Amino acid sequence: MDKERKFSAIAVVFGSCGDRYVLEGYSPKVSFAEMLERAKKVPDLTGIELIGGWHLHRDNAQEIVKQVADAGLQVSMILPELWSSAKWGLGSFAANDEKVRREAVDEVKQAMDLAARIECNAVCPWLGQDGYDYCFQIDYLKAWDRLIKGLRECADYLPTVKIAVEYKIKEPRTHCFVGTVGKAILLAKEVNRKNIGVTLDIGHALEAYENMAESVALLQQFGHLLFHLHLNDNYRLWDDDMIVGSVHTIELLELLYWLDKIGYDGWYSLDMFPYRENGQKAATEAIEWIKGLFRILDKIGPENIEKVIQQGDATEAMKLLRQGLLPPK
């Protein structure tokens, strides 16, 4: 398991994170240049994710990419903005309003154009506003048909750019259409394009009461669909976006094992909201946790882990973990 891994973070990790109680954030606002200054001080961080329309657009792409490169980083992913504007309040790709649907598809296409232009070649649409809050509010068949057709149009627009759809069970809607790994797989299979895959946000998986490692295995089993990875942690009740490894440490250990087992070689990208913490320190700590857990896996030995898995003996699995995690007597 000793190999180079690429670490990235969404730019907002290094900004002022607001919530619905303190909208302006818990620390002073900073510019994008200041975010990069903080990011470049994080050891082993080599990538930065940008939100289309927030950090990056057609007119400033060249300037922003130069700023990122001057900070010793590269753009790892572009996230089309489909959730934070009021116009998406009743949906984006699945909205009843055809004009809104067209704007959503165009938003993803613009992000794809930018991704191709700067040789990032990957976008991560999160359809967070596509869902519902009440019974009898939605025609589910029409909504899913719109999701499929919209994503298929985007995939055909630029086949060289990967589209990694991110799923989430709830928030901002009480029910998001693309809410689980199973739904994300169904959607990708129905769109049926080689450049359509899935972003596994492990916090979203936890919130949906998934086992993160099983989610990785399912994405592998049904078409090698794991295109991208967002890392954070929570208590399963909400998308808390905490420091990686802070709550579900053993489950994270199993996730990292399975990422290596399937040969995942993409970005390990931090999607955290350090509301009251220093973002630079939070990102540094998250990466150290990931690296440290990989060292534990190396110490235990993948062949020993595989042997225990094939035995299916929970007590032997716990023994192996205890010996790897705890100091000897």
Image (tube, grey):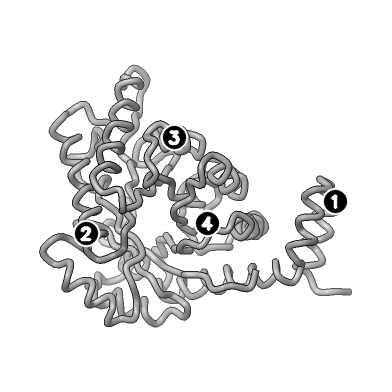
Task: Name which of mark 3 and mark 1 comes first in the sequence.
Answer: 3
Q: Looking at the picture, which amino acid does disc 4 mark? A: Asp
Task: Name which of mark 2 and mark 3 comes first in the sequence.
Answer: 2
Q: Name the residue tied to disc 2.
A: 114
Q: Secondary structure at mark 3?
A: helix
Tell me residue 164's x, y (percent). Answer: 38, 49
Residue 189 marker: 3
Are circles 2 and 3 on residues that touch, CB within 8 Å? no
Placement of the C terminus among the 4 image quadrants? bottom right
Q: Name the residue tied to disc 1.
A: 315
Front-most of residues 85 and 195: 195
Tell me residue 142's x, y (percent). Answer: 30, 21
Q: Secondary structure at mark 4?
A: loop
Q: Looking at the picture, which amino acid does disc 3 mark? A: Lys
* Alpha carbons under labels 2 and 3: distance apart: 26 Å
Asked whether the viewer can see residue 137, the reply is no
Residue 233 marker: 4
